[in-house]
């Protein structure tokens, strides 16, 4: 089984997150036992910010058996297509990354709705890469990915 990794799962382990460390570590171990762990270019770039030198991230990936798999045109097209759908159908409500619940936030001072662009193209690229190159994606952003990538098994 090939499992793609979202950056948040890896950062939970690299920068020990008290809330998510144990669960993320367990998920990584379980999916490592099931087969290959892969990341796309964006996850690599986000991870690179946590290492002092290029050789250090390369050593980390080699030691953990995580492979960088480059996106192909199909993955890039899927990302663009779903990004377009997201932009057209966006209601500008905030979305919980865990359950997908949508909510509106109002400024306490002026009473206007606060709009936040929660998802950027990188989220779509990570998921589309997983659709094409893996059988599942490990992530804590399950609600978002389930909403726009119903053809992707998201574990987290």
Image (cartoon, grey):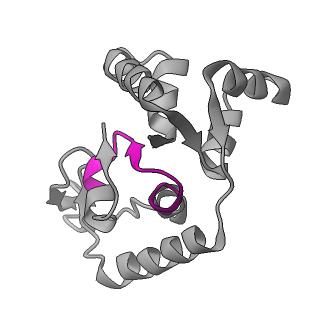
Identify the residue at horizontal 56%, vertical 77% (top origin): 77
* Residue 48 image-quadrant placement: top right
Identify the residue at horizontal 37%, vertical 62% (top origin): 116
* Residue 75 image-quadrant placement: bottom right
x and y percentages locating residue 138 in the rendered image: 39, 39
Residue 96: in sight, yes or no?
yes
x and y percentages locating residue 57 in the rendered image: 74, 27
Judge left or right: residue 26 versus residue 59: left
Identify the residue at horizontal 53%, vertical 35% (top origin): 36
* Above/below status of 91 relative to 39: below
x and y percentages locating residue 123 in the rendered image: 47, 57
Residue 114: in sight, yes or no?
no
Mark count: 0
Most distant residue in the bottom direction: 88
x and y percentages locating residue 96 in the rendered image: 23, 50
Identify the residue at horizontal 29%, vertical 48% (top origin): 142
Q: Say which of 32 and 148 sits in front.
A: 32
Task: Please give the range of residues in magenta.
Answer: 128-144
Judge left or right: residue 69 versus residue 52: left
Q: Is residue 78 magenta?
A: no
* Above/below status of 124 relative to 60: below
Q: Say which of 155 and 111 sits in front.
A: 155
Q: Quadrant of the C terminus?
A: top left
Judge left or right: residue 54 versus residue 80: right
* Above/below status of 146 relative to 81: above
Q: Quadrant of the N terminus?
A: top left
């Amino acid at each position: 089984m090939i499992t793609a990794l979202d950056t948040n799962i890896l950062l939970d382990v690299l920068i020990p997150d008290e809330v998510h460390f144990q669960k993320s570590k367990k998920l990584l171990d379980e999916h490592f036992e099931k087969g290959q762990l892969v990341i796309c270019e964006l996850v690599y770039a986000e991870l690179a910010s946590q290492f002092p030198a290029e050789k250090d991230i390369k050593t980390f990936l080699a030691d953990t058996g995580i492979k960088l798999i480059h996106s192909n045109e199909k993955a890039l097209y899927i990302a663009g297509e779903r990004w377009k759908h997201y932009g057209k159908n966006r209601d500008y409500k905030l979305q919980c990354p865990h359950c997908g619940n949508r909510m509106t936030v109002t400024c306490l001072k002026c009473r206007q709705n606060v709009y936040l662009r929660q998802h950027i193209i990188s989220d779509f690229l990570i998921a589309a890469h997983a659709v094409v190159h893996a059988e599942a994606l490990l992530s804590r952003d399950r609600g978002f990915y389930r909403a726009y990538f119903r053809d992707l098994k998201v574990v987290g």
